[in-house]
Image (cartoon, rainbow, N blue to C red):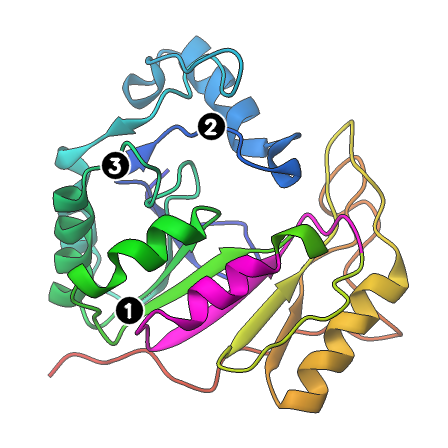
Amino acid sequence: MSDRSAIEWTEATWNPTTGCDRVSAGCDNCYAMTLAKRLKAMGQAKYQKDGDPRTSGPGFGLTVHPDSLRIPYGWRSPRTVFVNSMSDLFHARVPLGFVRQVFQVIADTPQHAYQVLTKRARRLRQVADRLDWPPNLWMGVSVESAKELPRVDDLREVAAAVRFLSCEPLLGPLDGLDVTGIDWVIAGGESGPRFRPVQEEWVTGIRDTCADADVAFFFKQWGGRTPKTLGRELEGRTWDEMPAREPVTAG
């Protein structure tokens, strides 16, 4: 879980923490929770701590992994890295000191671009001024429904070089979405046996908002029983726009 990724908008994953807890409707069919249960059964050491059954699951208890901090130093070629595909760095039980250590690794490896995504936007805003923000760190929040639009306001307060939104799984229209101060928006439907279908007008509404504001738009998938069931085309084409800012290079 620390190198090449099949996620369309990144190239690698790095999990200095694992485990999480449900916080909103977007968590209901969490792929990471399902995968953690499988990894626990396979004996994977990072997934042996169980979470609270009311909000988490087997192998998905929040766990900090200091030994994983060294991993990015071993990557020779530059890459775009999704941080914590199996957790949330701004979970309340991740010590601020450990978040600082993760940020230091990011600062020490400027040849890579790091994408950090959280649903804990309030904690992000509360601690942001106590963190040093490397220029190669992209900070995002999940916005799966209009109920979660306040997360965008929290993100705007953060001094990240790139700010982005992940509107996946998209569960409804984002009427009133304001992308001022946002550099990139990802949208996508849910996948898995209990997927909740996405409506085309929800996606085109987000795309049009981005186009009007000159914000990069990336459409990941329609979803279905598998991520690729219904493909990625929106109105006859794929949308793979990325933020204009380039990753910082070494030297």
Q: Which residues are magenta?
A: 149-172
Give yes or no for contact between labels 2 and 1 (Cβ–Cβ under 8 Å): no
C-alpha distance separating marks 2 and 3: 12 Å
Q: Picture quarter containing residue 206?
A: bottom right
Q: How many marks?
A: 3
Asked whether residue 145 appears in the rendered view, the answer is no
For label 1, the SS is: loop
Residue linked to disc 2: 21
Badge 2 crowding class, 10 Å Cα cut-off, few under 14, some 14 to 19, many 20 or more, is many
Q: Is residue 235 above or below residue 146?
A: below
Where, quadrant-wise, is the N terminus in this rendering? top left
Q: Nearer the viewer, residue 172 or 223?
A: 172
Residue 250 as seen in the image, left or right of residue 198: left
For residue 9, the mark is: none
C-alpha distance separating marks 2 and 1: 32 Å
> Which of the two discs, 2 and 1, labels the residue nearer the N terminus?
2
Q: Position of residue 114 (x, y in %)?
A: 33, 62
For label 3, the SS is: loop
Q: Position of residue 134 (x, y in %)?
A: 21, 71
Residue at screen point 88% across, 74% down: 236
> Which of the two discs, 2 and 3, labels the residue nearer the N terminus?
2
Based on the picture, tell me whether residue 153 belongs to the magenta stretch.
Answer: yes
For residue 94, the mark is: 3
> Which of the two discs, 1 and 3, labels the residue nearer the N terminus?
1
Q: Nearer the viewer, residue 45 or 137?
A: 137
For residue 78, the mark is: 1
C-alpha distance separating marks 1 and 3: 27 Å
Q: Nearer the viewer, mark 1 or mark 3?
A: 3
For label 2, the SS is: loop
